[in-house]
Every structure is written in C-alpha cells, then in structure tokens.
Amino acid sequence: MKKLIDYILQFGTLNQQQIDFIKNKAIEITLEKDGYFSEAGKIPVCVGFILEATTILIKC
C-alpha cells in the first residue's frame, strides 16, 4: 500500500485523512496466471495499481 501512496504523492499532496481514506477503500488482490484485470467490451468499474504480480484496487 505504501508504494501506491508514494506514487500518488508524486502528483500532489495529501493530508493524513486522505491517506487513511485511500488505505481503507483499497483492497489488494493477486491475479492468477492468465487471469484478467479487465475484459474487452466491458466498462471498467475499478482502477488498478499494478506492482509485479500484485494488483491493488481502488473501489469505485
């Protein structure tokens, strides 16, 4: 989660309340081999931050 927060902070500042909000709303999942984060033709409902084989999702 720290890498996600650090990435966001490259583009501006966040106060502690905003950081806590992101940490509470984000979930971490691991995609299985040949798994899909998004599918063609479907409207995305989440935003992902991909770090190696782990995806951290922000709920929409």
Image (cartoon, rainbow, N blue to C red):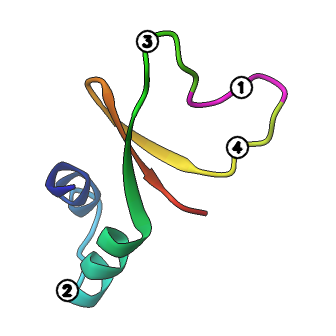
Mark nearest the camera among 3 and 2 is 3
| Quarter of the figure with residue 17 | bottom left
Residue at image location 43% in from the left, 27% down from the top: 31
- Label 3: state its secondary structure: loop
Mark 3 burial class by Cα count in 10 Å: few <14, some 14-19, many 20+: few
Q: Earlier in the sequence, mark 3 or mark 2?
A: 2
The region drawn magenta spans: 37-41
- Where residue 30 appears, x then y in whole percent? 37, 33
Callout 1 amino acid:
Glu
Q: Earlier in the sequence, mark 4 or mark 2?
A: 2
In this rendering, the answer to whether 24 lies above or below 56 is below
Label ID, residue 44: 4
Callout 2 amino acid:
Gln
Q: Earlier in the sequence, mark 4 or mark 3?
A: 3
Q: Disc 2 designates what residue?
A: 16
Q: Is residue 23 left or right of residue 57?
A: left
Mark 4 burial class by Cα count in 10 Å: few <14, some 14-19, many 20+: few
Position of the C terminus by quadrant:
bottom right
Q: How far is disc 4 from disc 3 in space, using C-alphas?
A: 20 Å
Q: Are marks 4 and 3 in contact (CB under 8 Å)?
A: no
Label ID, residue 39: 1
Q: How far is disc 4 from disc 1 in space, using C-alphas?
A: 8 Å
Mark nearest the camera among 1 and 2 is 1
